[in-house]
């Protein structure tokens, strides 16, 4: 169990890093093009990168439970 938890944390951190990097790339592109307001994707990526780890896992568990319930009933 410890390894799985540790691997999940590393994966989450990698996803956060990727989201921040893509949001930064979109911001730089937007500024080069002279646009002042961020687009939807840039805003969502920034928001997701700021979601704390506990909230992320709570959502992940809820989604997993909902999928399992749908499959069980389906």
Image (cartoon, rainbow, N blue to C red):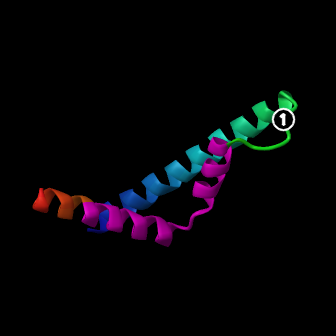
Residue located 38% across and 59% down the image = 8
Viewer-nearest residue: 67 or 21: 67
Residue located 70% across and 41% down the image = 39
Answer left or right for 16 relative to 1: right
Answer left or right for 34 relative to 43: right
Magenta stretch mostly in which secondary structure?
Answer: helix
Answer left or right for 43 relative to 33: left
* Image coordinates for residue 17, horizontal then vertical, percent: 59, 49
Numbered range of the magenta stretch? 40-66
* Image coordinates for residue 37, horizontal then vertical, percent: 80, 43
Residue 45 lies in the magenta stretch: yes
Q: Is residue 69 above or below residue 10?
A: below
Q: Quadrant of residue 29?
A: top right
Neighbours of disc 1 within 10 Å: few (<14), some (14-19), many (20+): few
**Furthest residue in direction front, as rendered:** 74
Q: Quadrant of residue 73?
A: bottom left
Label 1 element class? loop
**Furthest residue in direction top, as rendered:** 33
Viewer-nearest residue: 69 or 12: 69
In the rendered view of the protein, which quadrant contains the C terminus?
bottom left
* Image coordinates for residue 31, horizontal then vertical, percent: 84, 35
Q: Is residue 41 above or below residue 54?
A: above
Q: Quadrant of residue 60?
A: bottom left
Residue 49 lies in the magenta stretch: yes
Residue located 44% across and 61% down the image = 9
What residue would you read off at disc 1?
35
Residue located 24% across and 58% down the image = 67
């Amino acid at each position: 169990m410890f390894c799985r938890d540790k691997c999940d944390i590393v994966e989450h951190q990698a996803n956060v890093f990727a989201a921040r990097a893509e949001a930064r790339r979109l911001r730089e592109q937007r500024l080069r093009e002279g646009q002042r307001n961020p687009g939807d994707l840039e805003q969502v990526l920034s928001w997701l990168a700021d979601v704390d780890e506990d909230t992320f896992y709570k959502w992940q568990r809820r989604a997993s439970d909902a999928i399992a319930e749908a499959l069980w009933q389906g």
